[in-house]
Amino acid sequence: MLTTAKPDYAMLRTTLVTIILTLMLSACGGGKWGFPYRPDIQQGNWVTAEKVSQLESGMSREQVRYILGTPTLQNVFRSDRWDYPYYNKPGYGTTEKRQFTVWFEGDSLSHWSGDDQPNHQPFQKPDPKNHADDESSTAPTEPTPSASAHHADDPAVFAEPLD
């Protein structure tokens, strides 16, 4: 009887090791860390509603650059317009695109327009209980008659990343 106990013990140990390895490998494939790995692609400037609310007509280019950061797109032929596009493609999720544009007359800010900007940083998740507050407190853009004229004759170029 002792000779039959050893093979049963070896078979039990092999089965147990196989089950443990299977469980460990299956834990690697769950959720966001699935296979194949798809990295998040984030490009452009992150402009928040707080930054937009700090803008005032008549500000200098340096003041606007201090608040919003260096623009991603500057038109060589029309230096009176700065574009701040934002593109985020999570590895697993929906793509997000936003556009924000400021216009200058001479060296002073004349007006701005663009999509609604969020009230949080990219590394923060929006608070669901304050989500209604975010939409109501998002800084509105300044609509001006000349804004539509700029859009008609000089559309913003939004470069999409290559997949």
Image: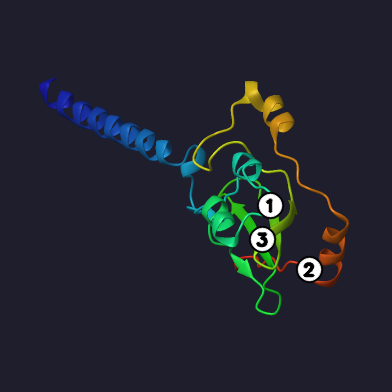
Give neighbour class at mark 1: few <14, some 14-19, many 20+ (Cα, 10 Å): some
Mark 2–mark 3 distance (CA, rounded to whole Å): 21 Å
- Local SS, label 1: strand
Residue at image coords 74%, 66%: 156
Q: Is residue 14 visible?
A: yes
The N terminus sits in image quarter:
top left
Residue at image coords 67%, 30%: 134
Badge 2 or badge 3: first in the primary sequence = 3
Dot 3 corresponds to which residue?
108
Nearer to the camera, 23 or 113: 113
Mark 1–mark 3 distance (CA, rounded to whole Å): 24 Å
Tag shown at residue 98? 1
Mark 1–mark 2 distance (CA, rounded to whole Å): 14 Å
Answer whether labels 2 and 3 touch (C-beta < 8 Å).
no
**Residue found at the far left of this picture:** 2
Residue at image coords 56%, 55%: 63
Dot 2 corresponds to which residue?
155
